[in-house]
Image: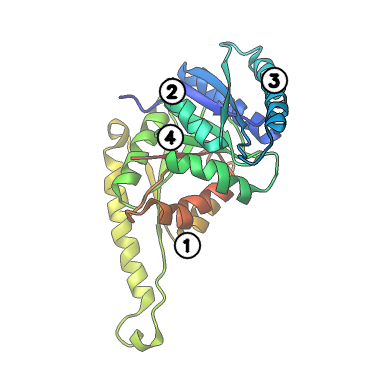
Protein backbone atom coordinates (compact mmCIF):
# COMPACT_ATOMS: atom_id res chain seq x y z
CA UNK A 1 0.00 0.00 0.00
CA UNK A 2 1.29 3.43 -0.94
CA UNK A 3 2.19 5.83 1.88
CA UNK A 4 1.39 8.84 -0.29
CA UNK A 5 -2.18 10.11 0.11
CA UNK A 6 -4.87 9.47 -2.48
CA UNK A 7 -7.83 11.03 -0.62
CA UNK A 8 -7.21 13.98 1.70
CA UNK A 9 -9.60 15.34 4.31
CA UNK A 10 -8.96 18.95 5.36
CA UNK A 11 -10.89 20.15 8.39
CA UNK A 12 -11.47 23.89 8.68
CA UNK A 13 -13.12 26.24 11.15
CA UNK A 14 -12.79 29.24 8.78
CA UNK A 15 -10.08 30.79 10.95
CA UNK A 16 -6.81 32.03 9.39
CA UNK A 17 -5.16 28.87 10.67
CA UNK A 18 -7.85 26.78 9.01
CA UNK A 19 -7.18 28.62 5.76
CA UNK A 20 -3.46 27.88 6.14
CA UNK A 21 -4.22 24.19 6.58
CA UNK A 22 -6.37 24.33 3.46
CA UNK A 23 -3.47 25.79 1.48
CA UNK A 24 -1.27 22.92 2.63
CA UNK A 25 -3.94 20.35 1.79
CA UNK A 26 -4.48 21.81 -1.68
CA UNK A 27 -0.72 21.79 -2.34
CA UNK A 28 -0.51 18.14 -1.31
CA UNK A 29 -3.55 17.19 -3.39
CA UNK A 30 -1.95 18.79 -6.44
CA UNK A 31 1.42 17.18 -5.78
CA UNK A 32 0.09 13.65 -5.26
CA UNK A 33 -2.88 13.88 -7.62
CA UNK A 34 -5.13 13.20 -4.62
CA UNK A 35 -8.82 13.82 -4.13
CA UNK A 36 -9.45 16.70 -1.71
CA UNK A 37 -12.37 16.92 0.71
CA UNK A 38 -13.05 20.06 2.78
CA UNK A 39 -14.88 19.53 6.05
CA UNK A 40 -16.51 21.74 8.63
CA UNK A 41 -17.92 20.12 11.75
CA UNK A 42 -21.01 21.78 13.19
CA UNK A 43 -20.71 21.07 16.91
CA UNK A 44 -24.14 20.35 18.38
CA UNK A 45 -25.39 21.39 21.78
CA UNK A 46 -27.18 18.47 23.36
CA UNK A 47 -28.60 19.67 26.64
CA UNK A 48 -31.45 17.45 27.93
CA UNK A 49 -32.69 20.27 30.18
CA UNK A 50 -33.49 22.66 27.33
CA UNK A 51 -37.18 23.31 26.81
CA UNK A 52 -38.66 21.83 23.65
CA UNK A 53 -39.37 25.23 22.12
CA UNK A 54 -35.76 26.26 22.76
CA UNK A 55 -34.60 23.10 21.01
CA UNK A 56 -36.60 24.08 17.91
CA UNK A 57 -34.98 27.52 17.90
CA UNK A 58 -31.53 26.00 18.16
CA UNK A 59 -32.29 23.60 15.33
CA UNK A 60 -33.30 26.54 13.11
CA UNK A 61 -30.07 28.37 13.98
CA UNK A 62 -28.03 25.26 13.25
CA UNK A 63 -29.75 24.82 9.89
CA UNK A 64 -28.92 28.43 8.98
CA UNK A 65 -25.33 27.99 10.11
CA UNK A 66 -25.07 24.77 8.13
CA UNK A 67 -26.13 26.55 4.92
CA UNK A 68 -23.77 29.46 5.52
CA UNK A 69 -20.81 27.21 6.24
CA UNK A 70 -21.53 25.00 3.26
CA UNK A 71 -21.50 28.10 1.05
CA UNK A 72 -18.24 29.20 2.68
CA UNK A 73 -16.68 25.81 1.97
CA UNK A 74 -17.82 25.91 -1.64
CA UNK A 75 -16.37 29.41 -2.00
CA UNK A 76 -13.09 28.19 -0.52
CA UNK A 77 -13.00 25.27 -2.95
CA UNK A 78 -13.83 27.42 -5.98
CA UNK A 79 -10.97 28.15 -8.34
CA UNK A 80 -8.86 25.12 -7.54
CA UNK A 81 -7.57 23.06 -10.46
CA UNK A 82 -9.48 20.05 -9.14
CA UNK A 83 -12.37 21.45 -7.08
CA UNK A 84 -12.64 20.02 -3.59
CA UNK A 85 -15.69 18.17 -2.37
CA UNK A 86 -17.37 19.95 0.55
CA UNK A 87 -18.93 18.47 3.66
CA UNK A 88 -20.67 20.02 6.67
CA UNK A 89 -21.45 17.41 9.31
CA UNK A 90 -23.01 17.62 12.78
CA UNK A 91 -21.17 16.04 15.70
CA UNK A 92 -20.95 16.23 19.46
CA UNK A 93 -17.30 17.31 19.12
CA UNK A 94 -15.10 18.54 16.28
CA UNK A 95 -12.57 15.75 16.76
CA UNK A 96 -15.21 13.03 16.65
CA UNK A 97 -16.73 14.53 13.51
CA UNK A 98 -13.35 14.73 11.78
CA UNK A 99 -12.37 11.14 12.58
CA UNK A 100 -15.81 9.74 11.73
CA UNK A 101 -15.91 11.57 8.39
CA UNK A 102 -12.40 10.40 7.59
CA UNK A 103 -13.51 6.79 8.08
CA UNK A 104 -16.75 7.21 6.15
CA UNK A 105 -14.97 8.75 3.15
CA UNK A 106 -12.03 6.31 3.32
CA UNK A 107 -9.57 9.19 3.45
CA UNK A 108 -5.90 8.35 4.01
CA UNK A 109 -4.68 11.73 5.33
CA UNK A 110 -6.20 14.37 7.61
CA UNK A 111 -4.98 17.99 7.48
CA UNK A 112 -5.93 20.57 10.11
CA UNK A 113 -4.60 23.69 11.77
CA UNK A 114 -3.14 23.75 15.26
CA UNK A 115 -5.01 26.94 16.27
CA UNK A 116 -8.75 27.58 16.16
CA UNK A 117 -10.84 30.66 16.52
CA UNK A 118 -10.15 30.76 20.25
CA UNK A 119 -6.50 31.44 19.48
CA UNK A 120 -5.27 29.46 22.49
CA UNK A 121 -3.24 26.58 21.14
CA UNK A 122 -3.31 24.64 24.36
CA UNK A 123 -7.08 24.63 24.56
CA UNK A 124 -7.54 23.67 20.94
CA UNK A 125 -4.81 21.04 20.99
CA UNK A 126 -6.36 19.53 24.06
CA UNK A 127 -9.82 19.40 22.51
CA UNK A 128 -9.32 18.94 18.78
CA UNK A 129 -5.91 18.45 17.18
CA UNK A 130 -4.44 16.34 19.95
CA UNK A 131 -7.53 14.15 20.08
CA UNK A 132 -7.53 13.72 16.30
CA UNK A 133 -3.86 12.70 16.39
CA UNK A 134 -4.63 10.18 19.13
CA UNK A 135 -7.69 8.62 17.53
CA UNK A 136 -7.39 9.00 13.75
CA UNK A 137 -6.71 5.75 11.87
CA UNK A 138 -4.61 7.60 9.27
CA UNK A 139 -1.66 10.05 9.32
CA UNK A 140 -2.49 13.59 10.46
CA UNK A 141 -0.78 16.71 9.16
CA UNK A 142 -1.02 19.68 11.54
CA UNK A 143 -0.15 23.17 10.33
CA UNK A 144 0.51 26.33 12.31
CA UNK A 145 -0.64 29.72 11.05
CA UNK A 146 2.94 30.88 10.54
CA UNK A 147 4.19 27.58 9.12
CA UNK A 148 5.73 27.76 5.64
CA UNK A 149 3.82 25.85 2.96
CA UNK A 150 6.22 25.14 0.07
CA UNK A 151 4.72 25.88 -3.34
CA UNK A 152 6.85 23.29 -5.10
CA UNK A 153 6.67 20.38 -2.67
CA UNK A 154 8.70 19.32 0.30
CA UNK A 155 12.48 19.49 -0.02
CA UNK A 156 13.80 18.77 3.51
CA UNK A 157 12.15 16.28 5.89
CA UNK A 158 13.09 15.68 9.52
CA UNK A 159 12.20 12.34 11.14
CA UNK A 160 12.68 11.92 14.91
CA UNK A 161 13.65 8.27 15.54
CA UNK A 162 13.68 6.44 18.89
CA UNK A 163 14.33 2.98 17.37
CA UNK A 164 10.78 1.77 18.08
CA UNK A 165 8.51 0.13 15.54
CA UNK A 166 6.35 3.24 15.63
CA UNK A 167 9.24 5.44 14.59
CA UNK A 168 10.12 2.89 11.91
CA UNK A 169 6.61 3.31 10.47
CA UNK A 170 7.13 7.09 10.35
CA UNK A 171 10.46 6.58 8.59
CA UNK A 172 8.80 4.45 5.90
CA UNK A 173 6.18 7.13 5.25
CA UNK A 174 8.79 9.89 5.23
CA UNK A 175 11.01 7.95 2.82
CA UNK A 176 8.15 7.54 0.36
CA UNK A 177 7.21 11.22 0.60
CA UNK A 178 10.86 12.18 0.21
CA UNK A 179 11.35 9.90 -2.77
CA UNK A 180 8.29 11.29 -4.48
CA UNK A 181 9.62 14.84 -4.16
CA UNK A 182 13.34 13.99 -4.39
CA UNK A 183 13.62 15.58 -0.94
CA UNK A 184 16.48 15.39 1.55
CA UNK A 185 15.72 13.13 4.52
CA UNK A 186 17.27 13.50 7.99
CA UNK A 187 16.87 11.03 10.85
CA UNK A 188 17.19 12.58 14.32
CA UNK A 189 17.71 10.78 17.60
CA UNK A 190 17.65 12.58 20.94
CA UNK A 191 19.67 11.18 23.83
CA UNK A 192 17.99 12.37 27.00
CA UNK A 193 20.43 13.03 29.87
CA UNK A 194 19.87 11.08 33.05
CA UNK A 195 20.49 12.84 36.34
CA UNK A 196 21.68 10.46 39.04
CA UNK A 197 21.75 11.14 42.79
CA UNK A 198 25.10 12.21 44.16
CA UNK A 199 25.38 8.83 45.90
CA UNK A 200 26.20 7.13 42.58
CA UNK A 201 28.69 9.64 41.25
CA UNK A 202 31.77 7.70 42.38
CA UNK A 203 30.92 4.72 40.19
CA UNK A 204 29.06 6.32 37.28
CA UNK A 205 30.12 9.42 35.41
CA UNK A 206 27.12 10.83 33.47
CA UNK A 207 29.29 12.42 30.77
CA UNK A 208 30.87 9.06 29.97
CA UNK A 209 27.48 7.38 29.86
CA UNK A 210 26.07 10.04 27.55
CA UNK A 211 29.09 9.66 25.29
CA UNK A 212 28.53 5.94 25.00
CA UNK A 213 24.83 6.41 24.35
CA UNK A 214 25.62 8.92 21.61
CA UNK A 215 28.03 6.52 19.94
CA UNK A 216 25.59 3.59 20.07
CA UNK A 217 22.72 5.77 18.90
CA UNK A 218 24.75 7.16 16.00
CA UNK A 219 25.69 3.65 14.86
CA UNK A 220 22.09 2.43 15.06
CA UNK A 221 20.79 5.53 13.28
CA UNK A 222 23.34 5.15 10.48
CA UNK A 223 22.26 1.53 10.05
CA UNK A 224 18.59 2.53 9.90
CA UNK A 225 19.39 5.12 7.23
CA UNK A 226 21.50 2.85 5.02
CA UNK A 227 18.70 0.89 3.38
CA UNK A 228 16.35 3.80 2.77
CA UNK A 229 15.26 5.06 -0.63
CA UNK A 230 16.86 2.31 -2.71
CA UNK A 231 20.23 2.75 -1.04
CA UNK A 232 20.25 6.54 -1.33
CA UNK A 233 20.04 6.65 2.46
CA UNK A 234 19.52 9.71 4.61
CA UNK A 235 21.44 12.15 6.75
CA UNK A 236 21.61 11.34 10.46
CA UNK A 237 21.98 13.47 13.56
CA UNK A 238 22.21 12.67 17.28
CA UNK A 239 21.71 15.40 19.89
CA UNK A 240 21.54 15.47 23.68
CA UNK A 241 18.60 17.09 25.45
CA UNK A 242 14.91 16.75 26.22
CA UNK A 243 13.20 15.06 23.29
CA UNK A 244 10.35 17.52 22.74
CA UNK A 245 12.52 20.59 23.16
CA UNK A 246 15.29 19.24 20.92
CA UNK A 247 12.96 18.19 18.10
CA UNK A 248 11.12 21.53 18.08
CA UNK A 249 14.45 23.42 18.18
CA UNK A 250 15.87 21.38 15.31
CA UNK A 251 12.81 21.81 13.09
CA UNK A 252 13.38 25.42 12.13
CA UNK A 253 11.96 26.95 8.94
CA UNK A 254 14.69 27.09 6.34
CA UNK A 255 16.36 24.00 7.74
CA UNK A 256 13.31 21.74 7.26
CA UNK A 257 9.84 22.15 5.82
CA UNK A 258 8.22 18.99 7.24
CA UNK A 259 8.57 16.83 10.35
CA UNK A 260 7.32 13.23 10.24
CA UNK A 261 6.88 11.57 13.63
CA UNK A 262 5.39 8.36 15.04
CA UNK A 263 2.61 8.86 17.57
CA UNK A 264 3.99 6.18 19.89
CA UNK A 265 7.55 5.66 21.07
CA UNK A 266 9.27 3.07 23.21
CA UNK A 267 6.48 3.29 25.78
CA UNK A 268 3.45 1.15 24.99
CA UNK A 269 1.12 3.73 26.51
CA UNK A 270 0.09 6.17 23.81
CA UNK A 271 -1.15 8.88 26.13
CA UNK A 272 2.13 9.05 28.02
CA UNK A 273 4.04 9.70 24.80
CA UNK A 274 1.55 12.30 23.63
CA UNK A 275 1.92 14.02 26.97
CA UNK A 276 5.71 13.94 26.95
CA UNK A 277 6.98 14.18 23.37
CA UNK A 278 4.50 14.27 20.50
CA UNK A 279 2.20 16.73 22.25
CA UNK A 280 5.15 18.98 23.05
CA UNK A 281 6.29 18.94 19.42
CA UNK A 282 2.74 19.37 18.15
CA UNK A 283 2.29 22.56 20.14
CA UNK A 284 5.58 24.18 19.17
CA UNK A 285 6.72 22.75 15.84
CA UNK A 286 7.26 25.77 13.55
CA UNK A 287 6.85 23.69 10.36
CA UNK A 288 4.05 21.29 9.34
CA UNK A 289 4.06 18.10 11.43
CA UNK A 290 2.92 14.74 10.04
CA UNK A 291 2.10 12.22 12.76
CA UNK A 292 1.92 8.57 11.78
CA UNK A 293 0.31 5.68 13.63
CA UNK A 294 1.79 2.22 13.25
- Mark 2 / mark 1, whichever is N-terminal: 2
Label 2 near label 3: C-beta < 8 Å? no
What element does badge 3 sit on?
Answer: helix
What element does badge 2 sit on?
Answer: helix
Distance between mark 1 and mark 4 Cα atoms = 25 Å
Q: Nearer the viewer, residue 64 or 101?
A: 64
Decide if residue 182 is on the left or right side of residue 92: left
Q: Which mark is residue 72?
A: 3
* Residue 137 pos. (x, y %): 39, 34
Q: Quadrant of the C terminus?
A: top left
Residue at left 30%, top 24%? 1
What element does badge 1 sit on?
Answer: loop
Residue at left 41%, top 33%? 138
Distance between mark 2 and mark 4 Cα atoms = 16 Å
- Which is closer to the viewer, label 2 or label 1? 2
- Mark 3 / mark 4, whichever is N-terminal: 3
Quarter occupied by residue 114: top right
The crowd level at tag 2 (other Cα within 10 Å; few <14, some 14-19, many 20+) is few
Residue 80 position (above or below residue 204): above
Which residue position is annotated with label 1? Answer: 242
Distance between mark 3 and mark 4 Cα atoms = 26 Å
Q: Which mark is residue 104?
A: 2
Decide if residue 255 is on the left or right side of residue 267: right
Distance between mark 2 and mark 1 Cα atoms = 39 Å
- Mark 1 / mark 4, whichever is N-terminal: 4
* Residue 279 pos. (x, y %): 50, 51
- Mark 2 / mark 4, whichever is N-terminal: 2
Amino acid sequence: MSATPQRILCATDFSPTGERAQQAAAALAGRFGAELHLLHVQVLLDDPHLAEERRDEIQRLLATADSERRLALEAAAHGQTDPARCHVVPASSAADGIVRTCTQLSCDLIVLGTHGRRGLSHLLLGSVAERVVRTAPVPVLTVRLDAPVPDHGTSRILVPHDFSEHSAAAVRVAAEWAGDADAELTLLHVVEPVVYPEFYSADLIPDQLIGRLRDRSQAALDEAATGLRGGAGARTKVVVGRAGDSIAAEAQPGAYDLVVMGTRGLSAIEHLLLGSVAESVLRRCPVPLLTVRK
